[in-house]
């Protein structure tokens, strides 16, 4: 395993040489970055709260052992090097020696062990650290994660916002599973990251300034970050345009993205969201009525025109996605059935499934949606399926919990849904297809899908440390899902990052702003 | 003595009303499918079922409805509005943090609408068919019927983007350093657009009402008598007629106290004004029961106090009111 790591380092060095060859400019130190959060923050501590809103301030306040560049290669961060044992059952992190928390206390392996314990007990993604049995701390700068089985997903789970190293001397004063309500998750935060908290005003802003004792020489470049909380997308758009904001991420309204693209001083890019991996899809309840029949699900896929959704509804801002893994991921398999629109095929499949057309109608289905933004998609599905004789009734939900309840209890036929990959497929992909995860709340396997081979492939991929073999396992996994269609995968959610020409080194790695922005700087 | 008795009865009614508001809202919230654990899970990109159940346990959402209701009412009776599930902070703290921003916005908008509305209303009542009168009517109807979020965005595009006079969002520019007056001017600059937007609804109400009552008053006998006495037009309008036609306007202004929460929600959302309206909106979206109930409780209080104050104000301008029970 050691040699593999060396290979990666060499590749990384090459990649960074290539990258810096293009951007020759020397970063400038100083300045205040004006940036934005699209909703109010619930919690600033990513060890106990997931989500992209916590991710932005969270990844600045807290450092993780690893970080990723835009080519899915792990880079040293709090861990200056790491090693996976040959049996894959222990992962050794060698921590940097000069790292300190914002109060000046050294960051030690004890804090790493403590953070893993807190994340295991409080973080919503159990799959991330479930195989970690103990964390050994032979000395202050060595942490050895002992695993019950090989766990390649650990690499991504140790980066971005997913593994915040938090100080035991601050959060250790309550029971481990009570850290999620610790008062210092939101005030007097003592973190390990490049920036420290100055002020968090609920509903107004989060202000941070440079942590002078940050362990990376010369970084961060910015003196200060002001994150304003502006929930209206149109107001944010005007603020980018008139210079009140330098940068923002996770803009997803096609109309606004296209408008901002026309502004000379701004760059609007979909790069940097592969790790988050947001996907839009049509979920189908495989346990109910006509949808039990895979031919019906295929007919629906052939009748719903992806291109119309991408071109007309998403106005060209979203990309096609054919499987449950984001197209930017190295595990994505594009070589599966694409379901190009074909009404004859759809009609033939429905006839074959035993639903003949009678008076222009075959049968009825319902479609749900959880938030107003995707109403055009469900209205389109209704119109598209009418052409093949399926009468669709659109059911709206009063609010998110109402919809979540319907999904979680499988009280639906079809629904438009948006789900994130969150790095490794083990974290955010398996949950949708695993037969042991049926109807366990929203964003579980709400389709009631069960296929023993899919379960087996997922289980094998979860413990396969060889990247090529793993890729092959996921390729088959995706092919089966694309063939059996518990979910008809349509497009990526068009998250875009907007930054003005004053901003250097915008965060376009796989984690977008859920990663440290210690390299971002402001030009003169 | 009679005044004291009336007040006591009204306070007792108010307390009962508040309790009814709480029980009713608590029950309604409980009837809706799903709960705050779902929205917490949404904010985290999905959560393991184990974690969801733990959240429900932590916040007592797994207990029977009647126990939850009893616990809550008990807490409120001991002046504790509880903890926000979503923000993990005391509800009282959340509300008090947001209150000043909303008060500033609502009161300045009300004041603007009241002054401008009454002045223009009275003016157009004197010349009901003049060009100004028609213009005021048109303007008032436009302000009243245009959705505020649209008016707001329009103002933003005009005065933040094309003519960059005013900032886009928020209540202050945190990068500004300086003394009290610099900060005062900064807040004032941020206030202008949301204030005008919010005032555009109230303006219609006040100007139309002032115009109508003023026209009615101007046609009454005592105004004719006053004119016959040889008083100047000015004296008739401003000393006699205005005072008498103001009381409906004051009543209306008092009723608008409830707008502390309701009227400002959309305007606050458009301008990211860090007030109570935004908090109410977010809590409803998040199904954060303690915060929603806290805000409802609080706004019920504001309405009741507002109505009492309106009564006093009416007594001042119209002595007849005090005589009645």
Image (cartoon, coloured by chain):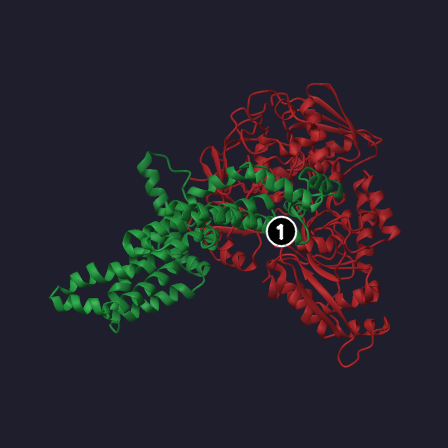
Chain colours: A red, B green
Q: Relative to A16, is B312 above or below?
A: below
Task: Answer left or right for A166 relative to A389.
Answer: left
Q: Relative to A79, is B101 above or below?
A: below
Task: Answer left or right for A79 relative to B228.
Answer: right
Q: Relative to B277, is A191 above or below?
A: above
- Furthest-left residue in this view: B230
Residue B109 is situated, as x and y percent measured from the top left of the image, at: 36, 52
Residue B14 is situated, as x and y percent measured from the top left of the image, at: 48, 48
Q: Nearer the viewer, residue A244 or A518?
A: A244
What residue is shown at x 64% (from left), y 44% (from top)? Answer: B69
- Furthest-bottom residue in this view: A359
What residue is shown at x 21% (from left), y 61% (from top)? Answer: B240
Q: Quadrant of the C terminus of chain A?
A: top left
Q: Quadrant of residue A213?
A: top right
Q: Is residue A508 visible?
A: no
Q: Is residue B56 visible?
A: yes
Q: Which residue is mark 1?
A: B29
Q: Nearer the viewer, residue A426 or A198?
A: A198
- Furthest-top residue in this view: A139
Q: Quadrant of the N terminus of chain A?
A: top right
Q: Quadrant of residue A406?
A: bottom right
- Furthest-right residue in this view: A452
Q: Nearer the viewer, residue B119 or A12?
A: B119
Q: Quadrant of residue A373?
A: bottom right
Residue B296 is situated, as x and y percent measured from the top left of the image, at: 52, 48
Q: Chain of mark 1?
A: B
Dot 1 crowding, Cα within 10 Å, few <14, some 14–19, many 20+: some
What residue is shown at x 84% (from left), y 43% (from top)? Answer: A459
What residue is shown at x 29% (from left), y 64% (from top)? Answer: B121
């Amino acid at each position: 395993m050691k040699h593999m790591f060396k290979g990666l380092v060499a590749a990384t060095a090459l990649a960074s040489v290539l990258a810096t060859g293009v951007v020759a400019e020397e970063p400038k130190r100083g300045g205040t970055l004006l940036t934005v959060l699209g909703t109010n923050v619930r919690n600033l501590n990513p060890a106990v709260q997931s989500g992209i809103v916590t991710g932005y301030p969270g990844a600045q306040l807290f450092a993780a052992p690893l970080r990723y560049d835009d080519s899915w290669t792990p880079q040293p961060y709090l861990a200056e090097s790491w090693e996976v044992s040959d049996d894959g059952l222990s992962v050794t992190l060698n921590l940097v020696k000069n790292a300190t928390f914002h109060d000046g206390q050294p960051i030690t392996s004890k804090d790493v062990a403590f953070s893993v314990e807190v994340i295991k007990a409080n973080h919503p993604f159990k799959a991330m650290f479930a195989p970690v049995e103990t964390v050994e701390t032979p000395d202050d700068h060595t942490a050895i994660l002992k695993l019950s089985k090989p766990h390649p997903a650990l690499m991504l789970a140790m980066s971005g916002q997913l593994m915040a190293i938090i100080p035991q001397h601050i959060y250790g004063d309550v029971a481990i599973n009570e850290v999620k309500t610790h008062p210092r998750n939101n005030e007097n935060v003592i973190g390990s990251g490049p920036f420290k908290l100055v002020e968090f005003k609920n509903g107004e802003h989060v202000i941070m300034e440079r942590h002078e004792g940050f362990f990376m020489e010369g970084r961060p470049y910015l003196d200060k970050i002001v994150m304003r909380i502006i929930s209206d997308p149109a107001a944010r758009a005007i603020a980018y345009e008139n210079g009140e904001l330098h940068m923002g991420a996770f803009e997803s309204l096609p109309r606004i993205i296209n408008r901002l693209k026309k502004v000379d001083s701004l760059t609007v890019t979909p790069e940097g969201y592969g790790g988050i991996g947001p996907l839009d899809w049509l979920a189908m309840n495989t346990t109910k009525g006509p949808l039990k029949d895979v031919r019906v699900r295929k007919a629906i896929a052939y009748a719903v025109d992806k291109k119309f959704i991408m071109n007309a509804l998403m106005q060209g801002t979203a990309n096609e996605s054919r499987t449950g893994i984001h197209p930017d991921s190295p595990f994505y398999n594009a070589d599966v059935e694409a379901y190009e629109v074909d009404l004859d095929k759809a009609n033939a499949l429905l006839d074959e499934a035993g639903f003949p057309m009678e008076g222009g109608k075959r049968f009825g289905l319902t479609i749900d949606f959880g938030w107003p933004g995707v109403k055009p998609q469900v209205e389109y599905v209704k119109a598209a399926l009418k052409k093949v004789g399926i009468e669709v009734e659109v059911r709206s939900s009063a609010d998110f919990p109402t919809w979540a309840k319907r999904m979680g209890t499988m009280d639906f036929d079809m629904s438009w849904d948006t789900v994130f990959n969150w790095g490794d497929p083990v974290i955010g992909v398996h949950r949708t297809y695993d037969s042991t995860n049926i109807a366990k709340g929203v964003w579980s396997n709400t389709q009631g899908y069960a296929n023993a081979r899919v379960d087996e492939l997922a289980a094998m991929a979860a413990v396969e440390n060889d990247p090529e073999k793993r890729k092959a396992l996921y390729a088959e996994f995706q092919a089966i899902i694309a063939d059996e269609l518990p979910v008809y995968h349509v497009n990526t959610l068009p998250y875009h990052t907007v930054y003005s020409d004053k901003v250097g080194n915008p965060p376009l790695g796989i984690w977008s702003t859920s990663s440290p922005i210690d390299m971002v700087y402001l030009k003169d | 003595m009679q005044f004291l008795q009336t007040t006591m009865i009204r306070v007792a009614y108010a307390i009962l009303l508040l309790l009814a508001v709480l029980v009713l809202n608590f029950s309604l919230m409980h009837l809706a499918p799903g709960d705050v654990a779902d929205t917490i899970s949404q904010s985290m990109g999905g959560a393991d079922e184990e974690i969801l159940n733990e959240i429900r346990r932590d916040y007592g959402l797994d207990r029977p409805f009647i126990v939850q209701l009893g616990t809550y009412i008990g807490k409120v009776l001991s002046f504790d509005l509880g903890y926000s599930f979503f923000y993990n902070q005391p509800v009282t703290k959340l509300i008090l943090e947001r209150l000043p921003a909303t008060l500033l916005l609502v009161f300045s908008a009300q004041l603007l609408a009241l002054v401008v509305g009454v002045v223009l209303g009275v003016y157009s009542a004197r010349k009901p068919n003049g060009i100004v009168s028609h213009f005021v009517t048109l303007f008032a109807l436009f302000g009243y019927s245009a959705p505020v979020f649209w008016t707001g965005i329009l103002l933003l595009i005009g005065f933040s983007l094309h003519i960059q006079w005013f900032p886009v969002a928020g209540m202050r520019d945190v990068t500004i350093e300086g003394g009290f007056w610099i900060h005062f001017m900064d807040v004032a600059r941020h206030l202008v657009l949301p204030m005008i937007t919010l005032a555009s609804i109230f303006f219609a109400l006040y100007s139309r009402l002032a115009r109508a009552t003023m026209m009615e008053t101007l046609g009454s006998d005592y105004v004719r008598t006053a004119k016959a006495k040889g008083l100047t037009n000015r004296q008739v309008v401003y000393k006699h007629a205005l005072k008498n036609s103001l009381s409906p306007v004051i009543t209306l202004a008092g009723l608008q106290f409830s707008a502390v929460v309701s009227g400002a929600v959309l305007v606050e959302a458009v301008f990211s004004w860090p007030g109570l309206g935004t908090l109410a909106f977010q809590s409803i979206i998040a199904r954060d029961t303690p915060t929603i109930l806290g805000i409802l409780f609080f706004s019920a209080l504001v309405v009741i106090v507002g109505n009492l104050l309106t009564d006093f104000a009416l007594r001042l301008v119209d002595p007849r009111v005090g005589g009645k029970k």
